[in-house]
Image: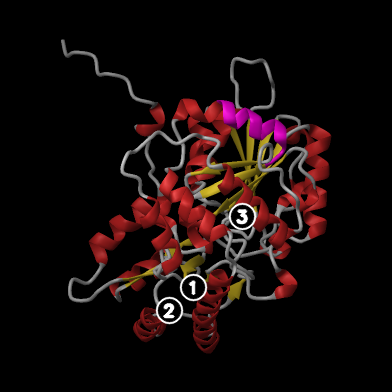
């Protein structure tokens, strides 16, 4: 008789995997060995982190290391509040409205753990996720034991979430709604009326709304400058912001949460048990980054240049781009509808982009381009695309 196997969470033994793991497996299987890959798959900017931020971090590395606190340096929370006032015109209390996070991916993942209580008697166990979506919303909800309700975004709505497409029966069971604005992967942007509509529903039924604003500084039309959920009140709302894209600091893992003081207080109680406190020398770099807006404008100009080149190329080829109002993503409709097949042809040409179907229901037939390579790499990628373009039916 064989010995019993030690247990694992069933989610770790079921079929399926993180979509970018699947993408990298395809890359290993199909990529040519004789040329360097140009990677538009994962949204990891290849722009240099501004020198003043790097210098600040180096100078802040201590001789003796100590455990950082979850609440973070008061100077960091004050710098965040200053940026929020400049950017959104919203006044944050650094003590009650703000909590640092390690880049926000971990904070996004952990949020459902702080809200879902299977043995607490609360019937609100559902997390509503507009789809296609950033995969971590689903992963965090599943591991927290939540029920998940996907709401496919529609092309006819401009890839924007409409709360009227979710039934009152679902809202009555909802603990959390994720709003990613600007939206990954489509680049759509919500207006003030859309936020007002969502928050009215949230306050009526008593659920939390999380505004994931990772791309809030990557806009190209001042008339469509992304908003913050907190411009529509703190009640039932929490916003997530990160330096990863704003300041080309993905590896520094630095961001923050801000919003309803009730939830911020609960997360201050929850997070020490998880051990997610930001290192103090990273906080020093974050203080410098949130205190300066000029470097963000420079980065935005670089993305705008890359965006212009790709939009020109796609237009010349007759490849349609939808939404894509903000972020460094372009949401391109594949002419023949086969997003996975198109991505495989790209890989064979030494170019990597993400099939829309990898990002959830509703993404089929689209490719997400993350314009994170340098401008020179983008130009080389466009040359390589010529070898792919003639193999795709319009």
- How far across and how far down the image is residue 157, in percent? 72, 62
**Foreground mark, 3 or 1?**
3
The mark total stands at 3
Q: Residues within 10 Å of mark 3 (few under 14, many from 20)?
A: many
Residue annotated with mark 2:
392
* Residues rendered magenta in the picture: 259-269
Name the foreground residue: 105 vs 91.
91
Quadrant of the drawing holding the N terminus: top left
Q: At x 55% / y 27%, what residue is drawn?
A: 270
Q: Gap in Å between the C-alphas at discs 2 and 3?
A: 35 Å
Q: At x 43% / y 79%, what residue is drawn?
A: 392
Residue annotated with mark 3:
213
- How far across and how far down the image is residue 103, in percent? 48, 49
Q: Secondary structure at mark 2?
A: loop
Name the foreground residue: 120 vs 74.
74
Q: Is residue 213 magenta?
A: no
In the displayed orientation, state which residue is furthest to the bottom.
Answer: 316
Question: From this viewpoint, is residue 354 visible?
Answer: yes
Residue annotated with mark 1:
336
Please tell me in which quadrant of the rendered image residue 12 appears.
top left
- How far across and how far down the image is residue 220, in percent? 63, 75
Q: Gap in Å between the C-alphas at discs 2 and 1?
A: 7 Å
Q: Is residue 260 magenta?
A: yes
Question: From this viewpoint, is residue 363 visible?
Answer: no
- Earlier in the chain: of badge 2 and badge 3, it is 3
> Tags 2 and 1 in contact by the CB under 8 Å rule?
yes
- Earlier in the chain: of badge 3 and badge 1, it is 3
């Amino acid at each position: 008789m064989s010995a019993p196997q030690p247990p694992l969470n069933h989610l770790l033994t079921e079929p399926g995997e993180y979509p970018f793991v699947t993408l990298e497996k395809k890359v290993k299987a199909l990529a040519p060995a004789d040329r360097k890959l140009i990677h538009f798959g994962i949204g990891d900017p290849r722009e240099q982190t501004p020198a003043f931020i790097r210098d600040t971090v180096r100078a802040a590395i201590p001789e003796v290391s100590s455990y950082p606190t979850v609440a973070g340096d008061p100077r960091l929370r004050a710098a965040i509040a200053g940026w929020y006032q400049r950017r959104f015109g919203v006044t944050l209390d650094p003590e009650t409205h703000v909590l640092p996070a390690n880049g926000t991916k971990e904070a996004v993942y952990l949020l459902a753990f702080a809200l879902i209580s299977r043995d607490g008697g609360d019937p609100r166990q559902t997390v509503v996720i507009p789809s296609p979506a950033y995969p971590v919303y689903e992963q965090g909800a599943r591991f927290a034991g939540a029920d998940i309700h996907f709401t496919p975004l529609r092309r006819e709505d401009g890839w924007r979430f409409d709360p009227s497409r979710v039934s009152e029966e679902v809202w009555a069971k909802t603990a959390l709604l994720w709003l990613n604005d600007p939206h990954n992967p489509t680049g759509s942007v919500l207006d003030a009326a859309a936020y007002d509509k969502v928050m009215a529903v949230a306050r009526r039924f008593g659920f939390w709304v999380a505004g994931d604003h990772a791309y809030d500084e990557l806009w190209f039309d001042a008339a469509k400058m992304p908003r913050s959920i907190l411009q529509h009140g703190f009640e039932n709302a929490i916003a997530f912001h990160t330096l990863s894209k704003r300041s080309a600091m993905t590896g520094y893992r630095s961001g923050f949460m801000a919003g309803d003081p009730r939830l911020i207080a609960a997360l201050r109680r929850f997070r020490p048990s998880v051990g997610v406190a930001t290192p103090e020398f990273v906080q020093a770099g974050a203080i410098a980054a949130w205190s300066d807006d000029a470097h963000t404008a420079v980065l935005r100009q670089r993305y705008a240049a890359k965006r212009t080149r790709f939009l020109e190329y796609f237009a010349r080829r007759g490849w349609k781009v939808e939404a894509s109002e903000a972020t460094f993503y372009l949401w391109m409709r594949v002419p023949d509808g086969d997003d996975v097949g198109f991505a495989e042809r790209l890989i064979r040409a030494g170019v990597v982009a993400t099939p829309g179907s990898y990002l959830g229901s509703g993404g089929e037939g689209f490719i997400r381009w993350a314009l994170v390579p340098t401008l020179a790499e983008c130009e080389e990628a466009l040359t390589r695309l010529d070898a792919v373009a003639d193999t795709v039916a319009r």
